[in-house]
Image (cartoon, rainbow, N blue to C red):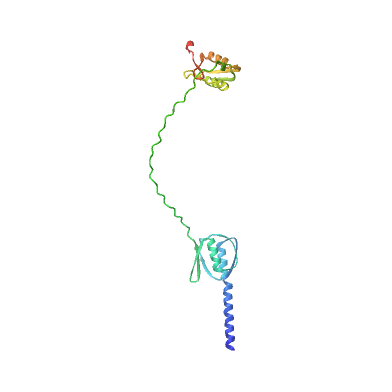
Amino acid sequence: MKKILIAIAFSVAAMSAIAQETKTNLVSVNAKGDDVRSVIHDMFKQAGKNFVLNPGVRFVLYLSLDNVKFENALELICKNANLKFEQKDGIYMIAQNPPKVELKPIIEEKPIVKTEPPKQIATPAAVKPKGTLPTSVLNKIVTTRLQKKELREVIAQLAQQTGVTIQISPDVPAYKLDAFLLKTSLKYALDEITTATGLKYEFTNELSIAIKKDPTKGN
């Protein structure tokens, strides 16, 4: 009977020790932006275990673990904070994981092959229109209010208003004119301008009007 009581007492003590060990192996962690160093310190203190943490460890944690096995909690924290740990003589050594190095494939450069530029095919010159404008274009109305403007600028305005192509010979000097023409015909405008500058105008066979020097006036 005495032996049975001793056995029961031993069994109860063993179960109590196992339960106590299981209870102490559970930890709770609640971090709201806390530094991983503080979280690890608190967790090891709950478990009653020893650890050494490298000084370069820095990380902010957001997690909530309630009555979780110590080993599971440590693995989760290390995974989130990119840490690693190992045990030496019952002491946990915790350090930062080395950064991952990405190996990029080496692209072999191909030799540059010079190619000849494509041969340009000559395009035919634009064909100028042929024919003579009707004299009725001189009846078109123009208006200008220009002061001391170069002859070519004045003629450009007349051409724009009438839609008639008016060309000035390259050897015509850059005369400056005061051109105040109010609702007059193109003929009147050209007559006044050529008279004032000693030039003349004539119809060409390219559907335009040409302004050139008048050899009879010796300009």
Q: Position of residue 28 (x, y in %)?
A: 60, 67
Q: Quadrant of the N terminus?
A: bottom right
User: Which residue occupies the foreground of this view, 34 or 12?
Assistant: 12
Residue at left 58%, top 70%? 26
Residue placed furthest toward the bottom? 1
Q: Position of residue 189 (x, y in %)?
A: 57, 16
Q: Position of residue 200 (x, y in %)?
A: 51, 14
> Is 31 positioned to the left or the right of 211 in the image?
right
User: Which residue occupies the foreground of this view, 194 or 89?
Assistant: 194
User: Which residue occupies the foreground of this view, 53 or 189?
Assistant: 189
Residue at left 55%, top 63%? 77
State whether residue 135 is above or below residue 127.
above
**Residue 54 showing in the rendered view:** no
Q: Position of residue 105 (x, y in %)?
A: 43, 52
Residue at left 54%, top 66%? 74
**Residue 14 showing in the rendered view:** yes
> Is 74 positioned to the left or the right of 101 in the image?
right
Residue placed furthest toward the right? 183
State whether residue 178 is above or below residue 35.
above
Q: Quadrant of residue 142?
A: top right
